[in-house]
Amino acid sequence: MRQNRDWKEIYKGLKDGNRVQLGIAFSLIESKRQADRDAAALLINECTRTSRQDTLRIGITGSPGVGKSSVIEKLGLAAIAEGRKVAVLAIDPSSSISGGSILGDKTRMQELSANQRAFIRPSAAGKTLGGVAKTTREFIAICEAATYDLILVETVGVGQSETAVYDMTDMFLFLVLPGAGDELQGIKRGIVEMADLLVVNKSEKDRKKLASQTALDYRNALHLLRVKDSGWKPAVKTHSIYDSESTSALWKNIKEYEDHINSNNYRLELRRSQQTKWFDELLQNELLEKLFSTFKNKPSDLEELRSRVSKMELSPIMAVRKIMDRLEINLKHQ
Amino acid sequence: MRQNRDWKEIYKGLKDGNRVQLGIAFSLIESKRQADRDAAALLINECTRTSRQDTLRIGITGSPGVGKSSVIEKLGLAAIAEGRKVAVLAIDPSSSISGGSILGDKTRMQELSANQRAFIRPSAAGKTLGGVAKTTREFIAICEAATYDLILVETVGVGQSETAVYDMTDMFLFLVLPGAGDELQGIKRGIVEMADLLVVNKSEKDRKKLASQTALDYRNALHLLRVKDSGWKPAVKTHSIYDSESTSALWKNIKEYEDHINSNNYRLELRRSQQTKWFDELLQNELLEKLFSTFKNKPSDLEELRSRVSKMELSPIMAVRKIMDRLEINLKHQ
């Protein structure tokens, strides 16, 4: 990034829906240079302060191979057909060894990515879940400023990243494959409870009957759970990318949910809780960063203890106690 | 817990393989009382200091419904048949809303849980991944002190919890269902790269052919990846709980891996890296705890900023900057 990049210029570009400025905004977010970070903070602050409340943020999760990308493409195209603008972010905090998917994101969602009313961002950089969550929140703020009104956040699998995405979206879709329903004891209650819409995907060819049975199993399981805080009763739908009516049914359910949270004012509650969680996470990350930089000035003690731990001369618990006993934290008066 | 519980008494009980003392040790770990935490630190320290290096720690992951519990039961029984003692811990950081699985852990692994040479601990308490990881590491230390030599750590899904479990185990098993292989572009490279053994489970009845095809797909995908740091070439196996030979093949592969990391001394390297990561995580958690308790004495400023954020008067980024500008961290000299 150029040193004197003017964030106001980028902000103006975003408001005009300029895709080049959108790309520049992302480079700014992901930059590690202090000047860029300062500019990014001001840009995000402006985007947040002036943010529209009528956008819809959807988190989409499911195991690898369940077909998340193709469902996102179909839903995105359905939304665009009704005049919306769609931004997609795929996050994958699990690929900490090498990063990236085997075939890469460019070969996925070809039709959607070619559409001028869609913007697709591949996996965010960052090794920690905190880093990914931070970048994703900033991505959402920027895309909404850039006039995108449907934000789709894709996350892989069923782990901690779901909770992170759940905390920053208005609606949560959980995709499963036909057949997984016969082992309901393996389905963790937490993930099913998070879903506003549960999709049994790849309901096609010889899997159609199995998909219906799976949907039934999930409907029965959902009966055991309480209604969500939003007052919304989650639906279970089968879906196939070869059956456009099934896509329409999903999209219709999403719009019903949107009407629901608008009419009972739950959307505002969601946004407030999203802001507060963003604050909490950011505070936590910044605190940690400051602490580690404190130790960076006196690394010898820390490194010596760490080395004794690695040689198994000292247990991690005792080593950490030694450090904590020396640490002082104060708040300056203002 | 009793105030004056003697951790040495518990430690002695563990060494004798006393299951009652094992249960008490877990209560001690999970207790929030300061006296218990101090005793737990001393107990864990002793367990770590005297730990055996000839145990095997296996992490097992896969989507809900893939059959992790039944594979663990079969593998556990195979290990016990050869004179080993097996400890199982299921962790599930994703169930942050209500916790627990729909049918509960007690109905799972019935045969294994009835066996005197097995110890099964249901999902660890703790809402944060850091908390779960901490408890799991302590669980491993305690079980190994209590003469268990095969430790199986089960985790749900494909997210951040895999990385956590990967960091504390010697071997990593990844379970998939037949059919998922036809969508290899959806499989994130990170999770496949982590696996030392990839199991296509539920290879039975009409899914047998599909399972073989899926195994082939994964084998081809693995060819694209490099050999692991351990020098081990990960295998892909089909498995069914109705086919005892397939269980034997899995167990045989696990023992081959064990021989491999013993012969090239990689086990020692693994243990050192596990200790260091434990140290890093613990330090991070303790630091955060101390910071939040610093704010607890002056909560007003923090709460006011947080409230302005929730009302969207102030962006999270600017609010956090205001806090960080006031924070001072020092190291006392010793």
Image (spheres, coloured by chain):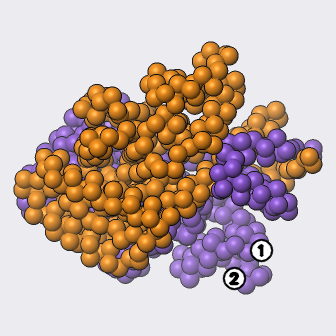
Chain colours: A orange, B purple
Residue B316 seen in the figure: yes
Q: Residue at x 27, y 70 (%)?
A: A218
Q: Which residue is mark 1?
A: B35
Horizontal side of residue A228 vs A234, given as left or right = right
Answer above or below: position of A274 versus A290.
below
Comparing B41 with B211, the one in front is: B211
Q: Which residue is mark 2?
A: B1
Q: Chain of mark 2?
A: B
Label 1's element?
A: helix
Residue B73 placed where, x, y %?
Answer: 32, 69
Horizontal side of residue A95 vs A31, given as left or right = left
Mark 1 surroundings: few (<14), some (14-19) or many (≥20) residues within 10 A: some
Answer above or below: position of A318 versus B86.
above
Q: Amino acid at mark 1?
A: Ala
Q: Amino acid at mark 2?
A: Met
Comparing A11 with A324, the one in front is: A11
Question: Are labels 2 and 1 assigned to the same chain?
Answer: yes
Mark 2 surroundings: few (<14), some (14-19) or many (≥20) residues within 10 A: few
Q: Chain of mark 1?
A: B
Q: Separation of disc 2 and disc 1 at Cα?
A: 9 Å
| Quadrant in the rendering for residue B112 | bottom left
Q: Locate the N terminus of chain B and report the quarter of the image it occupies.
A: bottom right
Comparing A60 with B199, the one in front is: A60
Compare marks 2 and 1 and give the one earlier in the sequence: 2
| Quadrant in the rendering for residue B47 | bottom right
Q: Are marks 2 and 1 in contact (CB under 8 Å)?
A: yes
Horizontal side of residue B39 vs B154, given as left or right = right
Residue B152 placed where, x, y %?
Answer: 42, 61
Label 2's element?
A: loop
Residue B12 seen in the figure: no
Q: Residue at x 69, y 72 (%)?
A: B32
Residue A158 placed where, x, y %?
Answer: 39, 56
